[in-house]
């Protein structure tokens, strides 16, 4: 399936909310808005859905630097998981590329 992907894109257009956009192989899209607490300005970033779900099972705190570096999910017991991002068409990306400080986000 060249040129097609299955991904979950995380964007932060509204302060205090994470927007998860799932795109499947047939380019069908579903969006969910989730309240979160953020520190800094998180990047717009995409992940393989299964790997994102596995990482969130380990810990609800996501530390994201930018779309080129791995993210890290951490749990309350100290467990952690590295999560590689996918490349995606940014379109209306509002990412602040000048900020490279990790931006943790936790489910509210």
Image (cartoon, rainbow, N blue to C red):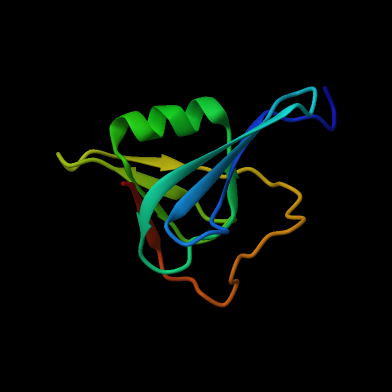
| Image quarter of residue 92 | bottom right
What is the x, y in percent for residue 42?
Answer: 48, 61
| Image quarter of residue 66 | bottom right
Residue lying at the far bottom of the rendered structure: 98
Q: How many numbered circles are shown?
A: 0
Residue lying at the far right of the rendered structure: 2
Along the viewing direction, whichever of 56 and 2 lies nearer the viewer? 56
What is the x, y in percent for residue 108?
Answer: 31, 46
21 over 72 or under it: above or below: above
Along the viewing direction, whichever of 40 and 18 lies nearer the viewer? 18
Q: Residue at point 57% right, 77% down?
A: 98
Instruction: Describe residue 19's horizontal placement relative to residue 7 as left or right.
Output: left
What is the x, y in percent for residue 103?
Answer: 40, 62
83 over 17 or under it: above or below: above
Instruction: Describe residue 44's horizontal placement relative to residue 53 as left or right.
Output: right
91 over 101 or under it: above or below: above
Q: Residue at point 18% right, 43% down?
A: 78
Quadrant the N terminus occupies: top right
Along the viewing direction, whichever of 76 and 17 lies nearer the viewer? 17
Along the viewing direction, whichever of 22 and 34 lies nearer the viewer? 34
Residue lying at the far left of the rendered structure: 77
Q: Residue at point 75% right, 23% down?
A: 25
Q: Residue at point 58% right, 50% down?
A: 45
What is the x, y in percent for residue 38?
Answer: 37, 60
């Amino acid at each position: 399936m060249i040129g097609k992907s299955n991904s979950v894109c995380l964007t932060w257009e509204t302060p205090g909310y994470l927007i998860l956009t799932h795109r499947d192989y047939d380019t069908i899209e579903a969006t969910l808005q989730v309240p979160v607490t953020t520190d800094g300005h998180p990047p717009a970033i995409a992940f393989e859905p299964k790997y994102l779900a596995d990482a969130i099972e380990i810990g609800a705190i996501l530390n994201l630097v930018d779309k080129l570096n791995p993210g890290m999910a951490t749990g309350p017991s100290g467990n952690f998981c590295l999560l590689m991002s996918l490349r995606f068409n940014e379109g209306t990306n509002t990412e602040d590329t000048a900020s490279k400080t990790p931006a943790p986000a936790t489910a509210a």
